[in-house]
Structure formats: C-alpha cells, structure tokens
Image: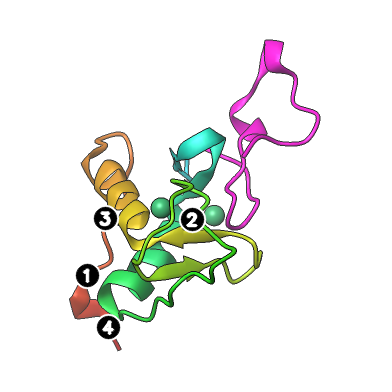
Amino acid sequence: MQRDGIDHENAQMSDIQCDFCHKPWTMERAMVEGHRGACVCSDCLTVAYAELVLHKVGSPASPEEICIMCREERDDPHWRSHMFDEALACRRCIKQAAGVLHKDRDVAWAKPAASTEK
Ligand SMILES: [Zn+2]
Ligand SMILES: [Zn+2]
C-alpha cells in the first residue's frame, strides 16, 4: 500500500508499505506488489509461506473477504496477517510472490525450507 499523504511527484521507497505489517519498503525489506498497489514484504512472506505451504495451516476466506493481493475469490487456503486482521492473502499469491523474490538476484531471500520445521 502507499503511505497516507504520499507525494506522488516525489515518491520514496519508504512511501510504500507492506499491507500485512505496515512497515516501509527498505533495502533490507523487499516488497512484492500485488493488485492495486497491495504489497507484501519479505518478512511477512516468510511467515505466510511457512504457514500456508509448509505447515498448511491456512483457512478458507469467509464469504465477504477476498485476498488483497489478487482481489479474487478463491477456494485456496488463506493467510491472515497477525497484525492487521483485514490483510488476507491466498496461497496462490503467496506462492507467486515467493517465486518472484526467490528469483530476484538483488534480494537475499529464500523460501523457508521444510527442514527448518520444528
Ligand atoms: Zn510485512
Ligand atoms: Zn490472492
């Protein structure tokens, strides 16, 4: 998402915030953009990917809710932000975002591995 009161003529990295933790985009915290400016940062992606893909603890979205990354109704399990209740992402988007970051050579991010499971 874009920070409130963003100066569109002079937008900075820090004007972009993760929709799931509301932290700004930095060199250390990569962002993947979804639909309509929704963003997920590498920190949240790690948690979401581990929960949805490794631990399979996602839950279906309730009928009045949709994934904020793709804005589509899906039967996929969804991940909800631990900090902001309204921030919901479907497994497809989390997998897609993880794929993008994983391949980005400028970003030192790797998919959480199953071997780190407790
Ligand atoms: Zn985040
Ligand atoms: Zn989605």
Q: Determine the main secondary structure of the stretch shown in magenta.
A: loop
Q: Residue at (43%, 46%) from the top-left corner?
A: 70
Say whether residue 87 is magenta. Answer: no
Look at label 2 and name its amino acid: Cys
Give how far apart the Cα atoms at labels 4 and 1 are.
Answer: 8 Å
Colour mapping: rainbow
Look at label 4 and name its amino acid: Glu
User: Label 1: which residue?
Assistant: 113
Q: Give the structural element (helix, strand or loop) at label 2.
A: loop
Q: Residues within 10 Å of mark 2 (few under 14, many from 20)?
A: many
Q: Give the structural element (helix, strand or loop) at label 4.
A: loop
Where is residue 94? Give x, y as percent: 36, 56
Q: Are marks 2 and 4 in contact (CB under 8 Å)?
A: no
Return the residue found at the far top: 9
Sequence-earlier tag: 1 or 2:
2
Whether disc 4's CB lies below 8 Å from ligand 1 is answered no
User: Label 3: which residue?
Assistant: 110
Where is residue 5? Give x, y as percent: 81, 29
The disc label shown at residue 117, or none: 4
Look at label 1 and name its amino acid: Ala
